[in-house]
Image: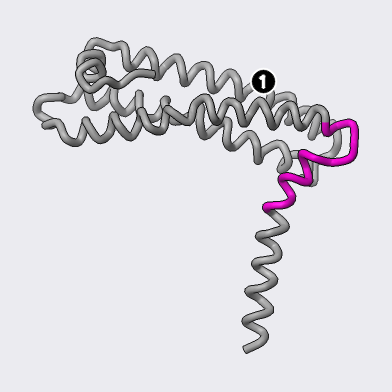
């Protein structure tokens, strides 16, 4: 019986260590902390900036489901899928970036690989966010979705 308790307390300690490890990574007593904290602030800002997209996506899905499929049509469904997928990417990309940086630097990579992956991540994440946000806005402005979005007051 105590063995099961020890295992569960070990698992809980590991979970607590993982939760702390993100904070320990970003707030260390080293000069790199200045860079990592700026990254954390920027990524957190993007998460908060795009968090409204989750509400927009849920609202869009709700009104789509409540409206007859025959009235909306196949073209609407295809553009709606594109909109739904691209409207969620900026939020989750920003969120994942917060956890990706510590994963890179705590991985078993050599220092040049860590630097390369960090620079690659810092270049790709804004590109991904910009492209998907643009596609979502374009999809919402298509003739098929525009009337639906205006009628149900759905805006980005």
Q: Nearer the viewer, residue 74 or 137?
A: 137
Residue 149, placed above or below residue 28: above
- Residue 93, given in percent of the width and then of the height, sits at 55, 31
Number of marks drawn: 1
Q: Is residue 82 above or below residue 106?
A: above
**Quadrant including the N terminus:** bottom right
Query: Viewer-proximal residue, 49 or 2?
Result: 49
Q: Is residue 95 left or right of residue 32?
A: left
The residue tagged 1 is: 123
Q: Image height check: is 93 above or below 137?
A: below
Residue at 18% x, 25% y is 74
Query: Which residue range is magenta in the image?
Result: 19-33
Q: Which residue is depicted at the point 41% across and 26% down?
A: 87
Q: Is residue 23 magenta?
A: yes
x, y percent for residue 45:
60, 26
Residue at (67% x, 73% y) in the render: 9
Neighbour class for label 1 at 10 Å: few (<14), some, many (≥20)? few
Q: Farthest residue in the right direction?
A: 30
For the stretch drawn in magenta, the main secondary structure is helix
Colour scheme shown = one colour
- Residue 140: in magenta span: no
Q: Quadrant of the C terminus?
A: top left
The spot of residue 7 in percent (x, y) is 66, 76
Q: Report helix, strand or loop for mark 1.
A: helix
């Amino acid at each position: 019986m105590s063995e099961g308790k020890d295992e569960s307390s070990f698992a809980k300690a590991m979970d607590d260590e993982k939760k702390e490890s993100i904070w320990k990574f970003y707030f260390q007593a080293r000069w790199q902390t200045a860079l990592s904290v700026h990254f954390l602030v920027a990524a957190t800002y993007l998460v908060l900036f795009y968090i409204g997209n989750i509400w927009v996506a849920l609202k869009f899905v709700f009104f789509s489901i409540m409206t007859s499929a025959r009235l909306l049509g196949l073209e609407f469904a295809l553009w709606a899928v594109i909109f739904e997928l691209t409207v969620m990417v900026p939020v989750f990309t920003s969120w994942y970036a917060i956890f990706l940086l510590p994963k890179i630097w705590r991985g078993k990579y050599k220092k040049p690989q860590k630097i390369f992956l960090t620079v690659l991540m810092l270049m790709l994440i804004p590109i991904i966010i910009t492209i998907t946000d643009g596609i979502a806005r374009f999809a919402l402005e298509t003739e098929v979705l525009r009337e639906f979005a205006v009628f149900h007051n759905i805006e980005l």
